[in-house]
Amino acid sequence: MRYDEFLARVRERGEYDSPHEAAEVTEAVLGVLAQRIGPGEIEDLASQLPGPLGPGLAGAKQSQPERFGIEEFHRRVAARVGGRPRTAQWDAGAVLTTVADSVSGGELNQVLSQLPSSYAALFGKPELTD
């Protein structure tokens, strides 16, 4: 998937007004995701993302992933975009379902294996939640 296609899907799913808004939300969600998964997995995921998304994600990696739940994930996304956690849930879903569509199934499984099962729904995989 090309970068412009990725942003178009995020924009459609999130009902954003512009590609710029979709890009800002995407950057925020991926930045928080980078805090939550290991650096090796970030590199693997980044290699499959289009355009500047891969380098942006790789640049946000930390030496050790933090452990926080889905509510904290939403809170952090909300803080980055200047919204509310409820809106951030929508934002995260728009971005992460698009990530799931654009990476291999094996890579998606690797990412999900590093997250609590409650995150699976954000990637459009509610059947994997407890």
Image (tube, grey):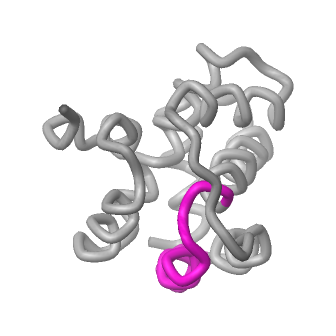
Looking at the picture, tell me which residue is in the foreground, 65 or 34.
65
Question: What percent of the width, then of the height, locates residue 17?
Answer: 71, 28
Q: Quadrant of the C terminus?
A: top left
Q: Residue at x 39, y 64 (%)?
A: 111
Q: Residue at x 59, y 32 (%)?
A: 91
Q: Is residue 106 left or right of residue 85?
A: left
Task: Examine the structure image and report whether residue 112 is included in the region drawn in magenta.
Answer: no
Q: Residue at x 43, y 52 (%)?
A: 98
| Prevailing SS of the magenta stretch | helix
Res. 120 visible in picture: yes
Question: What percent of the width, then of the height, locates residue 68?
Answer: 58, 41
Looking at the picture, tell me which residue is in the foreground, 22 or 34.
34
Establish if 48 lies above or below 92.
below
Question: What percent of the width, then of the height, locates residue 80?
Answer: 82, 37
Q: Is residue 12 left or right of residue 72?
A: left
Q: Is residue 86 left or right of residue 32?
A: left
Establish if 20 lies above or below 109.
above
Q: Quadrant of the N terminus?
A: bottom left
Q: Residue at x 18, y 43 (%)?
A: 128
Q: What is the span of residues highlighted in magenta in the rendered image?
A: 35-50
Q: Quadrant of residue 121?
A: top left
Res. 12 visible in picture: no
